[in-house]
Image (cartoon, rainbow, N blue to C red):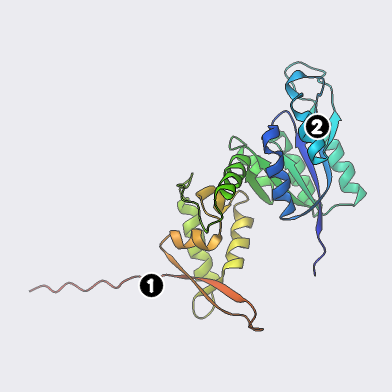
Amino acid sequence: MAEEKRFAVLIDADNVSGKYVKYILDEVSNEGAATYKRIYGDWTKPSLASWKNVLLDNSITPIQQYGYTTGKSSTDSAMIIDAMDILYAGHVEGFCLVSSDSDFTRLAVRLRESGMMVIGMGEKKTPSAFVAACNKFRYLEVLAQQAKENEKEDGEESETQPEMAPPAAIVHTILSMVRDNGDEDGRLPISEVGNMLARRYPDFDVRNYGFKKLSLFIKSLNMFEVVSEPSENGRNRIFYVMEKPQPRRRPRIYV
C-alpha cells in the first residue's frame, strides 16, 4: 500500500473566510494527511476575532504578523518564509496554499520546482495566474455547496443545475485524448482521462459543473460513452471512455 502523503496547509486569513475551514481540511484529507496546519494574519484586528473557535476546533496554529503599513498585507511574506522553511525541513510531500491572492503565484511555482505537490484553494475571484501555478486548484464556494448537498441527500447526483457550462476547450481536449491515446478499440481508461485533465486544467473539478463523478460528467457531454469490463483479477471493473458513434448521413439522391 502506498504511503500517505503529508501536506502543509497554509491559510491566508486576510483572504479566506472561517466558514470554509472544514471544507478545506476535508478536501486535503482526500489527498493525504495535514501535518502542518497554520494560518497567518494580524490577530489584533477585530475582524479576525471570529476565527478563535474555528482554530481551536480544528487544531490550527495561528501565526501573528503585524500590519506594519496601512493598506498592505504583511501576512504574505510570513507565509512564504514559513513555506520555504517547511520545504527545506523535508517533512512533507505537498503543500495546500489557501488564498485568493495572486501574490502566492511565485511560491506555488517554486514549490513545484522542488518536486512538491501543490494544491491551491480560493474563491472564484482568484486570479488565473495563481490557479495555473498549482497542480490542482479547488474553488471554496464549490466545496461548500457540494458539502451542503451531501448533507441533504446521498444520491448519485445532485438535482441542482450546474453552476458553469463545460468549456468547449475541455470537450475538445477529451475528444483529442480519446482519439490520440485510445486503444485499438478507441477506448481510454477514465482514470487516465481524469489525470490528463487535471494536469492540463488545474482548476478542473466535475463539482464545478454539478456532478460528483467524472463518469457522469463525461456522459452529460453527449459525445462519449462510458463502458466497463472486469479487471484481470475479476474483483474490480475498469471504466473506459470512447467516442460515441455518429449517425451516418444518408446520401441525397437527385432525380
Rendering quarter of residue 17: top right
x and y percent of residue 230 in the render? Answer: 58, 81
Q: Is mark 2 on a helix, strand or loop?
A: strand
Give the amino acid at mark 2.
Answer: Tyr
The answer to which of 202 and 63 lies nearer the viewer is 63
Q: Earlier in the sequence, mark 1 or mark 2?
A: 2
What residue did someone put label 2 on? Answer: 40
Distance of mark 1 from mark 2, alpha carbons? 54 Å
Residue 245 circle label: 1
Considering only vertical position in the picture, is 135 above or below 4? above
**Residue shown at 71% from the left, 55% from the top:** 30
**Residue shown at 69% from the left, 48% from the top:** 134
**Comparing labels 1 and 2, the label whose residue is closer to the camera:** 2
Classify 10 Å Cα crowding around label 2: few (below 14), some (14-19), many (20 and above).
Answer: many
Q: Can residue 16 be seen in this view?
A: no
Q: What element carries label 1?
A: loop
Whether residue 78 sits left or right of residue 147 in the image: it is: right
The answer to which of 48 and 185 lies nearer the viewer is 48
Considering only vertical position in the picture, is 243 above or below 39? below
Whether residue 126 sits left or right of residue 221 in the image: it is: right
Considering only vertical position in the picture, is 6 above or below 25? below
